[in-house]
Image (tube, rainbow, N blue to C red):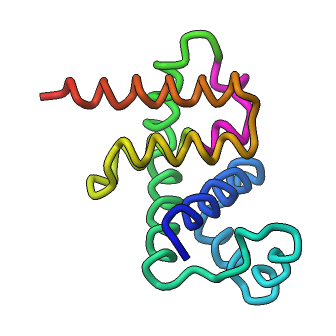
Amino acid sequence: MTRTIARQIAVRICYSADFLKEDPDILLNDFFSPDHYSSLSDSDAVYNESPDDIQMEYITNLLRNVYLHAEEIDDRIASFSEKRKLERIPRTALAVLRCAVCELLYFEDIPASVTINEAVEIAKTFDSPETVAFINGLLGSVYRSLSELP
């Protein structure tokens, strides 16, 4: 499994965690139970392969950080979302943004260009071109603001 697919899975779990308001550790345990995970491959090819230890660690770390730093991540998104209030951003787009902003803030080993590009590609599978452009612009603004820090 590639990091790209692991990232797609993390975004989907992030969406579910937000929608269900559930702790990601509980959600991860349920999501990756053998019966549940194997049943998903019938509806989506993303689930054809189970994550290996490295990808599972990435998914777990990403979701825990999104959960632990939710307020800071949402504040960053809101501060660069001039035309849309946080509650007006589609939930799928918000899941993509939360995961990507988390990577930009807390995953120094992932280049920002990779994070932004992959977020845009994932968003294309869920959202309208306008929303995809919004995500791209917002992530670019977040990245530039981080580059300006001393």
Residue ranking furthest to the left = 150
Where in the figure is residue 75, as x and y percent of width and height?
48, 28
Specify whether residue 87 is painted magenta: yes
The dominant secondary structure in magenta is helix
Specify whether residue 74 is painted magenta: no
Between 127 and 14, the one lying in front of the other is 127
Residue ranking furthest to the top = 83
Question: Residue at coordinates 46% horizontally, 40% vertically from top-left?
Answer: 116
Where in the figure is residue 110, as x and y percent of width and height?
33, 54
Where in the figure is residue 124, as x and y percent of width and height?
68, 40
Between 120 and 23, the one lying in front of the other is 120
Which quadrant of the rendered structure holds the C terminus?
Answer: top left
Where in the figure is residue 148, as x and y percent of width and height?
20, 24
Q: Is residue 79 above or below residue 65?
A: above
Question: Residue at coordinates 69% horizontally, 48% vertically from top-left?
Answer: 18
Image quadrant assignment for residue 131: top right
* Residue 12 in the figure: left or right of residue 96: right
Q: Is residue 142 above or below residue 100?
A: above
Q: Which residues are magenta?
A: 85-96
